Image: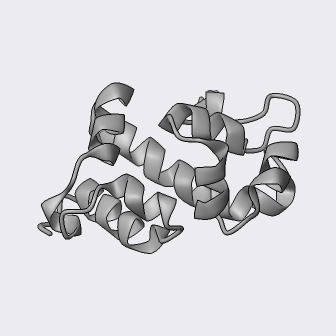
Amino acid sequence: MATAQTIRVPAPELFNPQSGRLDAARIAHELNVPVTTIAVAIGRKAPGVRKHPDSSSLQSELRRIYRVWVTLVELFAGNKAVARQFLNAPNRALDRRAPIEFIEAGDLGPLEMYVDSMMARQPI
């Protein structure tokens, strides 16, 4: 008889329990940044994101930040404090910019590529 496989969602605390969707306010809290930073990162206005932080229209862009965050936490063996330090520390591979600067500027592409290469253990 086949047994059901348990699938765990990484960082369930980032999802609104009522809607089941990613929540920008919860992500901001986890990354220790204002909701405004998340709004800028996803190309939205802060008041709208604050009012409806789990709106379905935000999900595709919130997923990008979520993926970066859960990958970093995984890379740092679940240590969220170290993942936050990594986000805020200047990085030679990112032209001495801190990864959080890419989020603040709404330029997630380079950060996503860097985190993907870290996960694949590719040299930068």
Q: Is residue 68 visible?
A: yes
Q: Is residue 99 left or right of residue 15?
A: left
The foreground one among 76 and 111 is: 111
Q: Quadrant of the N terminus?
A: top right
Q: Residue at x 80, y 45 (%)?
A: 50
The percent position of residue 79, horizontal first and vertical second, equals 33, 26
Q: How is the image coloured?
A: one colour
Q: Is residue 40 above or below residue 33?
A: below
The percent position of residue 66, horizontal first and vertical second, equals 55, 49
Callout count: 0
Q: Is residue 89 left or right of residue 105?
A: left
Figure quadrant of residue 25: top right
Figure quadrant of residue 101: bottom left
The percent position of residue 8, horizontal first and vertical second, equals 57, 32
Q: Is residue 78 above or below residue 111?
A: above
The percent position of residue 109, horizontal first and vertical second, equals 44, 73
Q: Residue at x 62, y 62 (%)?
A: 40
Q: Residue at x 11, y 67 (%)?
A: 123
Q: Is residue 102 left or right of residue 5?
A: left
Q: Is residue 104 above or below residue 5?
A: below
Q: Is residue 4 visible?
A: no
Q: Is residue 5 left or right of residue 93?
A: right
Q: Is residue 16 above or below residue 104?
A: above
Q: Residue at x 49, y 59 (%)?
A: 104
Q: Quadrant of the C terminus?
A: bottom left
